[in-house]
């Protein structure tokens, strides 16, 4: 499931950059070699193809998370104090990592990125169909604002991926559990 | 004499560091080609590769989804006159200095599955009932602007020329070399008009003189300017951008 995410989000982000470059709303463009699709039409084809993969994978993840109790057990919103405690130890590289369990910082980041992707899908629908899904577009303040939120969410998701990759690089043993299934380590281990 | 022959020419412990290095390099290379997506950036709908074929068939599926989402009664949002974008942005497949003037003896031609194929003069079009709209024009590039257009509802026009309203396509040919086509359901939408005026004035050449299509339920490239001919047809007509890979339905 995770590797389908990698592929789908990769396609969405890189084709999204190519689409953005067709008419940049901020005073910069993404380097053209990072774009997927070669030109606006190709990029849109990638974007509107990968969206189905993203939607299917996202739906499967949400259903799994709700039914298996994964969200309830591992993604409950932590108490602010727990967050600051873990955040402080993370900054000093003293935060332990137990495979199969999320610390408070991870919970906040994962909840944030799940929320970000949901918002990204909703604003995406709003700017894809601002007339047929007019209510959704109005909810986000109309087409131009929804488009800017869509861009801002992309930056947040990409920022999450950068942090996520940096942390995997720091704790390489987590990579093993992403490739082969491994049992969760016991909670009391420190 | 036997001893030297038994010895292998290369012993594994001698080349272990070299083997490890090669193994690591191979792993790195496969990781790059997997994650880099670099191989796929060549897939831009211009080739006959399997990936391009897959993309095109998904676009056709998307067209069906878009047609299903479309409602003939749902209106694009209307805006007050104060919301009109000024200055209004010019857009075409060519630069503004290449805009064509109206050809001498211009008539709007009608063809295909219609009863009356008499070409229309500007005066005849002006005599038909007109409607005005202030709506958002959304470009496929992402930018958008609000404009004020008025003209003849395409539905009224099609009924007047006795068009077969069960034909699936309405195609538009322009005298600047542009072309596009839309589905019949969108052609009959109340906000789909043959615009004669822009911002209270007869259309200037850069805004599509003398007649343009204005269809706020589709992306901007469907609102063809400088119309020459309208055809009601049962065969898929394509269009200038559609033939290069923009999705055909292009609804918003």
Image (cartoon, rainbow, N blue to C red):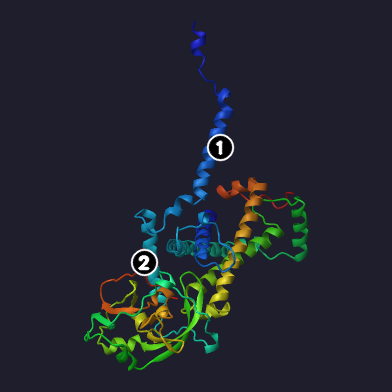
Around disc 2, counting alpha carbons within 10 Å, would you say few (fewer than 14), some (14 to 19), or many (20 or more)? some
Residue at horizontal 68 percent and vertical 63 percent from the top = A108
Q: Quadrant of residue B21?
A: top right
Does B24 sit above or below residue B216?
above
Does B113 sit above or below residue A103?
below
A63 or B160, which lies in front?
Answer: B160
Q: Is residue A30 visible?
A: yes
Q: Secondary structure at mark 2?
A: helix
- Is B187 situated left or right of A5 in this image? left
Does A188 sit above or below residue B123?
above
Pointer 1: what residue? B24
Q: Secondary structure at mark 1?
A: helix
Where residue B126 appears, as percent x and y from the top left, is 34, 92
The residue marked by circle 2 belongs to what chain? B
Residue at horizontal 29 percent and vertical 79 percent from the top = B230
Pointer 2: what residue? B60
Where residue A25 appears, as percent x and y from the top left, is 56, 69
* Residue that protrudes farthest toward the top in the picture: B1
Looking at the image, tell me whether mark 2 or mark 1 is earlier in sequence order: 1
């Amino acid at each position: 499931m995770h590797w389908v995410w990698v592929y789908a989000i990769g396609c969405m982000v890189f084709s999204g950059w190519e689409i953005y470059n067709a008419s940049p709303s901020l005073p910069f463009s993404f380097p053209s070699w990072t774009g997927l699709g070669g030109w606006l039409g190709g990029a849109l084809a990638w974007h509107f193809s990968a969206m189905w993969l993203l939607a299917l994978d996202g739906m499967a993840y949400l259903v799994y998370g709700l039914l298996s109790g994964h969200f309830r057990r591992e993604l409950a919103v932590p108490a602010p104090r727990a967050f600051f405690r873990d955040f402080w130890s993370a900054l000093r590289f003293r935060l332990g990592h137990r495979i199969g369990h999320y610390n408070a910082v991870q919970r906040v980041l994962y909840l944030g990125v799940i929320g970000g992707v949901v918002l990204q899908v909703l604003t995406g629908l709003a700017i894809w169909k601002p007339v047929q899904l007019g209510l959704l577009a109005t909810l986000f303040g109309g087409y131009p604002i929804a488009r800017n939120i869509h861009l801002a969410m992309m930056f947040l998701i990409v920022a999450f991926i950068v942090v996520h990759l940096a942390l995997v690089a720091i704790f390489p043993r987590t990579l093993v559990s992403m490739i082969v299934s491994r049992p969760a380590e016991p909670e009391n281990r420190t | 004499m036997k001893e030297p022959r038994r010895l292998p020419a290369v012993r594994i412990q001698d080349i272990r560091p070299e083997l490890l290095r090669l193994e690591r390099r191979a792993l790195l290379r496969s990781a790059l080609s997997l994650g880099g997506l670099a191989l796929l950036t060549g897939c831009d709908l211009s080739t006959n590769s399997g990936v391009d074929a897959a993309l095109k068939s998904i676009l056709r599926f998307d067209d069906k989804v878009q047609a299903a989402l479309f409602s003939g009664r749902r209106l694009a949002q209307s805006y007050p006159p104060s919301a009109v974008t000024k200055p209004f942005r010019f857009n075409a497949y060519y630069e503004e200095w290449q805009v064509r003037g109206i050809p001498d003896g211009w008539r709007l031609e009608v063809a295909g599955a219609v009863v009356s194929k008499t070409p229309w003069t500007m005066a005849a079009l002006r005599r038909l009932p007109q409607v005005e709209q202030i709506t958002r024009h959304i470009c496929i590039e992402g930018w958008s602007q609000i404009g004020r257009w008025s003209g003849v509802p395409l539905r009224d026009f099609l009924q007047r020329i006795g068009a077969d309203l069960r034909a699936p396509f309405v195609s538009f040919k322009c005298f600047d070399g542009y072309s596009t086509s839309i589905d019949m359901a969108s052609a009959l939408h109340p906000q789909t008009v043959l615009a004669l005026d822009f911002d209270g004035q007869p259309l200037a050449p850069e805004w599509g003189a003398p007649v343009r299509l204005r269809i706020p339920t589709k992306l901007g490239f469907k609102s063809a300017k400088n119309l020459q001919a309208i055809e009601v047809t049962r065969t898929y007509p394509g269009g200038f951008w559609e033939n290069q890979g923009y999705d055909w339905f292009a609804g918003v």
